[in-house]
Image (spheres, rainbow, N blue to C red):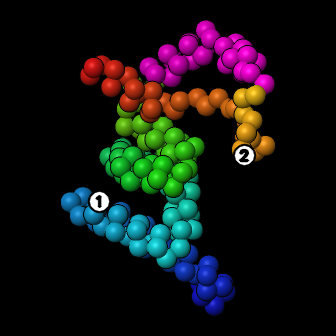
Amino acid sequence: MTACSAPEITRLVDGVTKLSRIELQSDQTKQAENFRKLVLAMSEDIRVLLVKLADRLHNMQTLRFIEDGEKRRRIARETMDIYAPLAERLGMQRMKDQLEDLAFAELHPDARASIVARRDFLRDKGAGVVPRILAELPPQAGRGRGAECSRVRPREIGIFDLAQNAAQERRL
């Protein structure tokens, strides 16, 4: 690797490789070691974490091809516990949502199917609401300091977030 590529690329690949070795440890020491290595990697070069997050997202998108169900669930749980919160802390909301939704699909497929069906029903029922609200915003909305870069964009709540909200409402 070193002979063919720049030292900077070699360092990034080495950092990702070191982070990948986390998965080989026992469950009891894994989480503490994960956070230690993630903080260490982040202090050296944030790009290592970005590559690792992108790699984990790809792994989650192809998780269905792993035949061993226990291994799929372990990877999904690790994604929920470590990688989704890390993406959130880095301000990567869309990646966090994708990681959580993919992991939730593996860990709780029946609950996810139920939530998706309900969400789709409600989305169809209220299809014109968001455009109507956006049209009614006053002309001064979005003006002011930094407004030239801002715009109002609705964001659909992720499946996992909907599941968490429903669970929280049941507890109240």
Q: Position of residue 67 (x, y in %)?
A: 42, 46
Using the image, determine if residue 2 lies above or below residue 123. below
- Give the residue at mark 2: 146
Give SS at disc 2: loop
**Which amino acid type is marked by label 1?**
Gln
> Which mark is first along the chain, 1 or 2?
1
Which residue is outermost to the bottom? Answer: 3
Q: Is residue 13 magenta?
A: no
Give me the residue at 60% from left, 16% from top. Answer: 123
**At 71% from the left edge and 44% from the top edge, which residue is drawn?**
145
Helix, strand or loop under label 1: helix
Q: CA distance from mark 2 to mark 1?
A: 40 Å
Q: Is residue 86 above or below residue 118?
A: below
Say if residue 21 shows up in the picture.
no
Tag 1 residue: 31
Range of magenta residues: 114-139
Which residue is nearer to you in this view: 91 or 16?
Answer: 91
Viewer-nearest residue: 168 or 108 = 168
